[in-house]
Amino acid sequence: MASPITTILVVEDENSIASFVSLYLKNAGYAVKTASNGKDALALAAAEKPALIVLDLMLPDIDGIEVCKRIRQSSDVPVLMLTARDEDIDKIIGLEVGADDYLTKPFNPRELVARIKSILRRAAPERHARESEVIVHGDLRVDAGRHEVHVGDEEIQLAPKEFDLLWELLDHRGLVLTRDQLLERVWGYTFAGDTRTVDVHVRQLRRKLGDASPIVTVWGVGYKVSPAREPQKDPAAA
Ligand code: CA
């Protein structure tokens, strides 16, 4: 009845980082495969079917962003990106690249393990629990089963975490959720983490949803969902 060993693929060309990350992951009970360039990473991702990939942004051949995009063409495997710079974050967690999370170097390996655990926890059962649920809020329609968001007739493409954050806020309409609460519910962190992650995702949601965004900033506290407006009817289209 032993649970199957979970394999994590670590992609990092700096040996010292690759080995201490591997050590911490093995100590946490994971099996670890390592790759030191993008080409090997793609081959191992296909051959080993890891449960999660830790992917460094700066690699000697194909960069991490391109590796992640290629993996995304055929797989939903969770990807945690390691980056040395803050400026890539919007892009990394955006739909185009599709990483599930990121850590900025230097990072605490315990935090890396905590995040991996929470990503794997979320990747497993929770999505199915709300499979048939749909939330309608004004012009906004969010379908958890299909993982689709519509504003009126237009489908809006959201990254996975943007979708989960929107769902969490809509699911708690009328309540203010703090950044820490949102981090814990959407990202699964059980400690006060990098709450800026929440702000980055809210910004993306507002940009993508435009006037249909229901998210209200409660200064000094967090975010909530505003009351629904009546669905707008365009008289010219009637
Ligand atoms: Ca590197």
Image (cartoon, grey):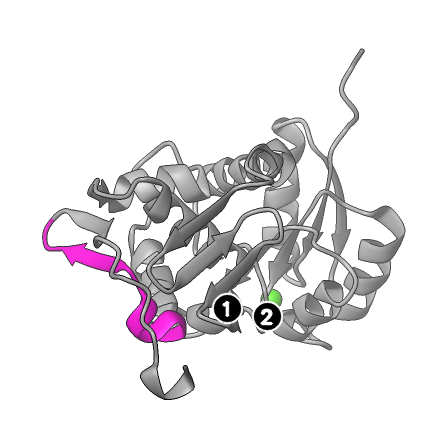
Which residue is located at x 10 percent, y 55 percent?
Answer: 219
In terms of depth relative to the viewer, which is nearer, 69 or 212? 212
Residue 97 - label = 2
Which residue is located at x 19 percent, y 49 percent?
Answer: 222
Q: Which residues are magenta?
A: 207-220
Instruction: Pick the quarter of the image with the N terminus.
Output: top right
Disc 1: residue Cβ within 8 A of ligand 1's nearest atom = no
Image side of residue 131 versus residue 86, left or right: right
The answer to the question of whether label 2 and label 1 lie on touching residues, with beta carbons closer than 8 A, is: yes
The image quarter containing residue 105 is bottom left
Question: Disc 2 residue type?
Answer: Val
Image side of residue 86 versus residue 224, left or right: right
Q: Is residue 159 above or below residue 169?
A: below
- As drawn, which residue projects farthest toward the top? 1
Return the residue at label 1. 94
- As drawn, which residue projects farthest toward the front? 238
CA distance for labels 2 and 1 = 6 Å
Counting from the top left corner in percent of width and height, residue 32 is at: 74, 41
Q: Is residue 124 above or below residue 52?
A: above
Q: Whereabouts is ligand 1, in terms of quadrant?
A: bottom right
Is label 2 in a helix, a strand or a loop? loop
Is label 1 in a helix, a strand or a loop? loop
Counting from the top left corner in percent of width and height, residue 79 is at: 62, 54
Q: Is residue 105 visible?
A: no
Disc 2: CA contacts within 10 A as few (<14), some (14-19) or many (>=20): many
Counting from the top left corner in percent of width and height, residue 38 is at: 75, 69
- Residue 1 is covered by the magenta coloring: no
- Residue 211 is covered by the magenta coloring: yes
Disc 2: residue Cβ within 8 A of ligand 1's nearest atom = no
